Image (cartoon, helix red, strand yellow):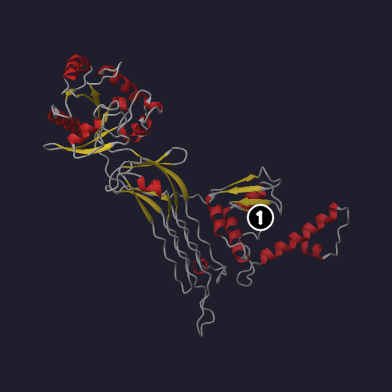
Amino acid sequence: MSRFVDRVTIHVAAGNGGHGCSSVHREKFKPLGGPDGGNGGNGGSVRLVVDPQVHTLLDFHFRPHAKASNGKPGMGDNRDGATGEDLVLKVPDGTVVLDGDGSILADLVGEGTTFEAAQGGRGGLGNASLASKARKAPGFALLGEEGQHRDLVLELKSVADVGLVGFPSAGKSSLVSVLSAAKPKIADYPFTTLAPNLGVVQTAGDVFTIADVPGLIPGASTGRGLGLEFLRHLERCAVLAHVVDCATLEPGRDPISDIDALEAELAAYRPALDADHGLGDLASRPRVVILNKIDVPDAADLADLVEPELAQRGWPVFRISAVSHQGLRELTFALAKLVADYRESHPKPVARRQIIRPKAIDETEFTVASDPEVEGGFIVRGTRPERWIAQTQFDNDEAVGYLADRLNRLGVEDELVRLGAVPGAPVTIGDMTFDWEPTTPMGEEVPMTGRGTDIRLEHNERVGAAERKQARRLRRGLPVDSDSSAEQDLR
């Protein structure tokens, strides 16, 4: 037996970017071949695409985890790594994407509409791309970025033109079965229908869709019964049709009280898509009243009593029998006319693809603040500094020196000095904490050493060791040894 699933939580992970390659061209009779390390490939992204052949979120219920492929690392001889393949997840028309806080990220309506659920990480640059006048043969490359990881909630809101509402066993499923080719489960006990049934209705010149919404009872808008689970399937409906059981034998039930009870629930429910689609709340949608089961003698008499009062409200009233098919022709053409009028006044949104416009990043877009958990420490936040930290090979001194140059050009060191940072102060960027040592100011010549090394880091290590040694002597009340190697280093 198939299952209908209209709300799931999925965990998507984009592919990681491939690492750049650090390589030097080696060929006979070419001793200075130069760097030839290729760039890493970008990681694959995870995309949601509307497919008209998909009608439920059942696949995501059983397989909620999805991961795109990683980018390949770069190689020597200027060979770039392959880009990771995007993972395309097919979703039904009418799927709404929400984040963990319940905020709407995308409303996927129309075949081919696409949403990027997780962005793939960028590949790292190889040393061929990092070569410059200052570094003619870099002995390092940049690491690839990690792909984006997100937890998303998918909600399916049925895209139907007419929504049938009514108490359990009012005959909604029976009406769908006789107006369309749909074959919903029909039985003589309440709550037979546990999921919306969607059918396609054809008239002489029009085609429209119709859906029954189960489980609507007083208190549905507050979570009673199944109403709260399925009220969202009415959000996109152009016309709401009250299906009233005129043959009910339950005490205290009559068509007028049934309609009033459900109208109160519709008025209390606030669709989340009003602002985006301009549909208004459910209370503002066109109404039709369908008096069902008039093939029963007592039901026909009751319909005669309530029809004038319903007509005073300005709602079209139709007397039908889903069993004998009485009145179905008039009802079908009337619904087609209402749907056509609605389509004319509310053009159907065209299929749209997500347009990604990269956000311009300011060169000075970072902040430096005191670390509340570490005395004398600082925290640097910003898109670029955090990304640069993730790209750096910290076991390579030349790569660390390149990182220091980038942070210096961005203005991080100047900001640390302005805030009173002293050498050795713990500075946190992203997930990395290090003892800050001022580097050689930009614009000065940096003596080049062997590949993978940086003379400034060696100097900072010697000076830092000397300062720590002198500080220990001062704390112990010992005189500073002016002839010590540490003092010589400080000079």
Whole-percent x, y for residue 388 in the image: 55, 57
Would you identify the image quadrant in which residue 372 lies? top right
Q: In the drawing, does residue 11 fall left or right of residue 257?
A: right
Q: Residue furthest left?
A: 204
Residue 111 visible? The answer is yes
- Seen at 53% across and 53% down, the residue is 384
**Toward which corner of the image does residue 187 lie, by quadrant?**
top left
Q: Is residue 145 above or below residue 98?
A: below
Q: Nearer the viewer, residue 177 or 105?
A: 177
Q: Position of residue 298 (x, y in %)?
A: 18, 17
Q: Residue at x 65, y 50 (%)?
A: 416
Q: Residue 66 or 396: which is nearer the viewer? A: 66
* Residue 389 relative to residue 372: left or right: left
Q: Vertical placement of 125 versus 415: above or below?
A: below
Instruction: Give the x, y percent position of residue 259.
Output: 28, 21
Residue at the extreme front of the image, as rendered? 188
The structure residue drawn at horizontal position 47% and vertical position 68%, both measured from the top left corner, is: 74
Q: In the rendered structure, which amino acid carries the disc numbered 1?
A: Phe
Residue 277 x/y as whole percent: 32, 35
Element assignment for label 1: strand
Side of 339 where 234 appears, left or right: right
In the image, residue 15 sits, relative to residue 337, either above or below, namely below
Q: Quadrant of residue 186?
A: top left
Residue for badge 1: 434
